[in-house]
Amino acid sequence: MSQKQIITVMGGGSFGTALANIAAENGNQVFQWMRNADQAKDMAESRENTRYLPGCKLHSGLIPVTDFTDAIAQSNLVLVAIPSKFFRQVVQQLKPCLQSHHNLVSTTKGVEAGTFKLMSQVLKEEAPQCSVGVISGPNLAKEVATRQLTATVVASDNEELRDLVQSAFHCRYFRVYAGQDTYGVELAGVLKNIYAIAAGMCTALSMGENTRSMLMTRSLAEMSRFAVRLGANPMTFLGLAGVGDLIVTCMSPLSRNYRVGYALGEGKTLDEAVGQLGEVAEGVNTIKYVKAKADELEVYMPLVNGLYEVVFNQRPVKEVIQKLMMSEQSNDVEFLVPEAAR
């Protein structure tokens, strides 16, 4: 029987709450930190996260807190589920509490503005004494919260951290696989947000299944081409964090990025689309950051360029799609296994 742990989850959003509840159901003591005292009070009394996961009852072992000091002191596993915009700021607040025995795991699929650093890189910079990992995969929070069968990946170069996460979160409906390509797993989760916006647009415009299939396949090629240039393993993109996450976010209206894309496809402005969502859609700003990095590295990313024109330059969607269909035809499969390795 696995040893029970004391875990702190930083962040009061939907996915952080879903993971915190799994860990509590597994017999672990779980503290969930949130900045909003009213939200924490309401959650403690109603046993629901009424803002982000309404209707999903939370385990009694999940304790909402607004002061993380004691929680971090007791925990050896800390999940950071904070939007990328505020990620470093919160981690810097944590720094005085962190020691070498702490294992830090990011669940955030975003890029830091101005640095193009992923959240695991931020963790390593701010807390070099700690072990660092990431959780990523096709994990729509509302489905996890309602116990739909789901799988995810914990990636880290630290085997003990991977084991701790698997022990804390693996259960009959949530399967946790392990990997070592932290950067590739995390980058896959970041990039798929972009293409989910494109998928939402396609649906709003009543485009066919052929179109959606082409979009997802070419998105995967574009993602892996960019990732390899940054040092990730292209094979990672064939797993849960890559093609798995891409499929679910490009097909489900539960995806925040998909819903933003759908609103844009209906003709709404970016401000209207984001306002209608009421939550952070990481993919919007990620388009901007990835385009700048791709231009810098001279990586061919026609889908990203087209989305940038629609989202930030208000170009008509159909005009951009026509341009994409007339763009350079690259190879279908770019990364082949050498004959000797087959």
Image (cartoon, helix red, strand yellow):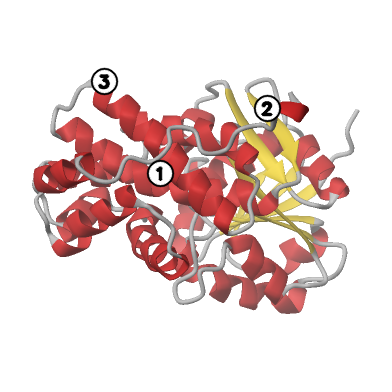
Question: Residue at 13% across / 46% down in the picture?
Answer: 317
Name the amino acid type tagged 1. Answer: Thr
Mark 2 or mark 1, which is nearer the start of the sequence? 1
Find the distance from the CA under tag 1 to the CA under tag 2.
Answer: 26 Å
The tag earlier along the polypeptide, 3 or 1, is 1
Residue ID for mark 2: 175
Residue 97 picture location, percent across and down: 76, 73
Disc assigned to residue 209:
3
Tell me residue 152's x, y (percent).
62, 34
Residue 50 shows which numbered tag? 1
Mark 3: amino acid: Glu
Please count the marks in the image. Answer: 3
> As rendered, which of 247 and 164 lies closer to the eye?
247
| Residue at 49% over, 69% down | 112
Label 3 – label 1 distance at C-alpha: 36 Å
Outermost residue, front side = 339
Camera-side mark, 3 or 1 = 3
Picture quadrant where residue 4 is located: top right
